[in-house]
Each structure stands twice: as structure tokens, then as C-alpha cells.
Amino acid sequence: MTINLHIYNTLSRAKERFEPLAPPFVGIYVCGPTVYGDPHLGHARPAVTFDLLFRYLRSQGCKVRYVRNVTDVGHLENDADEGEDKLARKARLEQLEPMEVAHCYTERYHKAMERLGTLSPSIEPRASGHIIEQIELIKRILAAGLAYESNGSVYFDVEAYDKRHKYGVLSGRMLDEMRTGTRTLDGGGDKRSPYDFALWKRAAPEHIMRWPSPWSVGFPGWHLECSAMSVKYLGERFDIHGGGMDLMFPHHECEIAQSVAASGHQAARYWMHNNMITIDGQKMGKSLGNFITLDELFTGSHPLLAQPYSPMTIRFFILQAHYRSTLDFSNEALQGAERGLDRLMKGVATLRKITPSDDSSVDVGELERSYAEAMDDDLNSPMVISALFDWVRTINQLHEGMQRITAADLERLTELVERIVFDILGLRDEKASGADNLVAPLVEMILEVRSEAKAARDWAASDRIRNALAAIGVRVKDRKDGPSEWEVE
Ligand code: ZN
């Protein structure tokens, strides 16, 4: 099988042709959400990015196993080593069992992701359900001599690892540079070196989330869960590991070190990282007052928002930028996306109203080629959208009779546009979804009654129907040849 996809591999820092290890099977692991807070803008981008990859690979005939974890063992501030467990903190503040907190926010995350049109992953493993696998992984790293036990906790020995394998291959942060960059870090506590990270932490008496282990009653370090769960579900070697760029260091770097320490080789072949989201040019953060949850976006209930933005507007906005560029949220940019999406959806709907001709003055193959080329080029969704916009113009010209298309070409064009817009980009026509599905057949039925009235020269009845529809926001456009058209204002 041929898969048309070149991926920018963060590990090699180059675009590489994507070749699965065991085609048609493709294994993808993506770092999922931490579930101790409402899903926010920062969750939307990786979810939409890897949903696009998932959808595209499936359309190329791949059998994709898409694993996205849920971090429900609250990791600590400062990279899993110190500070307070965020999940436990939330549980304490809200007087809940930690798993109640995790459950509640997992549900909210699922709902938000569904509204954003992301497909459910193939497997969604939870860190708390894989403590045994994580303990086994620690044992292997200890056996390799690349971790040490200290006071009931187990730490990864970064210095020893670096001598044997080289630490920092993904982020390019070399240990030597890190050493010169940090002057007054004391080894502190149980760690031999400040660069070492926890594989297992002995639980302090007040720590609620705790499990037994050979070393102490405690909990696993944050980086461990992804190494353990990716290999469990995708094998010792798998195709693609994804996540946000903010996870590259230390999280993904530590994942690589853990895999190499335990098995002698890396697990993932391609690393893909989506770039970050800014808001009005600033990094999103609670302290900056620009932390926006997805619910606040959908309802417009945040002081920075001029209006609500629908889930599809957000999805379309994310897809309008390449996943490796930064994406700046502002009211102007979102309003632009809203208008763009509306224009695109109207274009798709207009396809159904085109009357075919005996010959074609347009080349449908051109859209096919631009789409294939853009997606092959590291999932270039903005190029796909720009090709679609060129075709919206053409579709309108076809509708107005300024261009011609045969019935066969029209069928091909309709199939192609709908496949790209709905199946690959994962957009949906929000104005025609849910209960609104009833609107179209009802309006068509009313217009049929009206055209009967017109045929019977009952102009009063015809006008009454037209005005009544206008009063509820349905604008009717009469055409000389053929049935009337309508649109919701
Ligand atoms: Zn992870």
C-alpha cells in the first residue's frame, strides 16, 4: 500500500515519508488531558490536530490504533517531583474522592471533544489503571542500572543514562548545557542530581492517591505512564507519538530515556508536535486572566470574548493554521473564521443546486490534486482550505451559469468536496444539525404548498406564506426556472 504522507519528525528535525512498521496497521500514541480542570483552549489544538491525522490515515486505507491517555494520577508541580498533587488538591478543596474529580473532568473533556467533532480514540487508557505496568517498567530500568532507590522513592539516573545513551535527543537540550545553565541547583532531598526525575514517589502521609509497590506505598512519576501504556497497547516499537510542543521537554524526553533504558531502543519512530496557542499575542495562563475554557468559548461567557463561538468555528479556526505554527486567538480572528466557515458551508450546499450541462468548463481533477498534495505535505490543512475556497468561487459560478459542468463531473465534485469537508476536516454544518434537521424538509413542504397556491393564482396565500417564513428568518428567493430557493438568515 502507498500512503501519501510526509511528516515533520521532531526527532530528526526533517520531513520524512511516513512508512508504517507493519502496514496497514498504524499505531499512534498521543498524550491526553490531565483531568483535574475544565477542558480549555489548550486541549482543543492537539485533539483537532491528531484527529486530522487519524482521519487522514484511515482515508489512506490504514488500520489505525489511536491511543490517547487520560492522566488521572495527579502529577505534581515541577515535573512530578515536588509540590502538591493537583488532582488531590482539587479533591481536597471540593471535598471529593480524587476519582470523582477525575471522572467529572473526563466526562467534560469527552463532551467538549465530541462537540469539536473529534473522533473517539481507539483506546483511552488511564494512568491509574496501569500501576502494575508502571511498576514493571521501573523494575526493568532498575535492572538496567539506570535508576536508583532512595528513601522509598525511585529516581531515573540521568547522568548514568547520558554516559551510555545520550540524554536530550529529542529536545536538543544536552546535559552539559543544562549544567552550565543552572548555577545554584542543589541536589536536594532524595535525588543524587537535580536532573534526575522520579519514577516512583513515596507518598507523604497527606497524599490521598497511593498504591503499594516494592519500594513504598506511593505513586508513579508523571513521565512513566505514557512509556508504559504506549508499549502495552502498541508494542515495543510503534509508529507515531504525538502531543503538544510544551510536552517535548521534559515529558517526551524522559519518555524516550525510559524506553531506551528499559528495552535498549526507542519506542516511537516519528514524533509529531503541535505548536501552542496564544491569546491576543500572549501565552495563555490563569495568572494573566486569559485562561479560556471551551465552555466559555461556546457560550461567550468570558470577559475577553465579544460573542459565543461555535465548536465548528473553533475547529475551523484551528485547521486554518498549520499545526506546527503558533495560533493566536482574538475576537477578530475568530469572527473571520466564523465568516469563512459560513461561506464554505454555503458553497457545499450550493453544489446540490447546480444544473448540469453537456460539457465541463472546469477541471475537478485540479481540486483532487491540490488536496492530495497539501495533505501529503505534513497535513497542510490551510492549503486544503484555501483550495476549497477557490472552488467555492467556482461552485457559485456554476450555479449562476457562468461555468458549465457535466452530471458525472458534478457527482465527482460533490463527492470530493463533501469527503474533504466532512470526513477529513471533520467539519459539520451546525445550522443543519440536530433538531434543525427538521427545518429543511418542513420548509420544502411549505414551499410546495406555496407553489401550488401560485399555480392556482392565489397570490394572497403565496404572499402570506412568504411573509410568514420571513418573519421566522427564512428568506425565500423565487427563480424564473425551477423551484424557489430559501436560506435561514
Ligand atoms: Zn505523555
Image: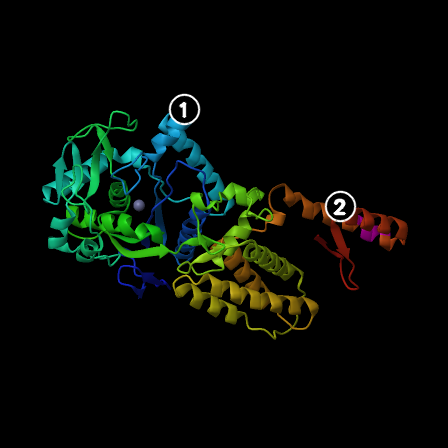
Query: Which residue carries the number 1 mark?
Result: 95
Q: How is the image coloured?
A: rainbow
Residue in the foreground of this view, choosing between 158 and 341: 158
The residue positioned 57% from the left and 41% from the top of the image is: 301
Across and down, in percent, residue 370 comes to 48, 69
Residue 379 is at least partly visible in this image: yes
Along the polypeptide, which appears first: circle 1 or circle 2? 1
Q: Is residue 451 magenta?
A: yes
Residue in the foreground of this view, choosing between 368 and 212: 212
Q: Which numbered tag is attached to residue 207?
A: none
Where's ligand 1: which quadrant? top left
The residue positioned 44% from the left and 43% from the top of the image is: 286
Q: Residues within 10 Å of mark 1 (few under 14, many from 20)?
A: few
Query: Which residue carries the number 2 mark?
Result: 472
The residue positioned 33% from the left and 62% from the top of the image is: 8
Across and down, in percent, residue 253 comes to 25, 51
Q: Residues within 10 Å of mark 2 (few under 14, many from 20)?
A: few
Q: Quadrant of residue 190?
A: top left
Residue in the foreground of this view, choosing between 352 and 250: 250
**Amino acid bearing label 1:** Gln
Q: Secondary structure at mark 2?
A: loop
Is 428 above or below relative to 420? above
Residue in the foreground of this view, choosing between 123 and 147: 147
Across and down, in percent, residue 121 comes to 39, 45
Q: Is mark 1 within 8 Å of ligand 1?
A: no
Region of the chain picked out in magenta, as a range: 449-453
Across and down, in percent, residue 332 comes to 57, 57
Is 408 above or below relative to 107? below
**Amino acid bearing label 2:** Ile
Residue 458 is at least partly visible in this image: no
Q: Is residue 136 magenta?
A: no
Q: Secondary structure at mark 1?
A: loop
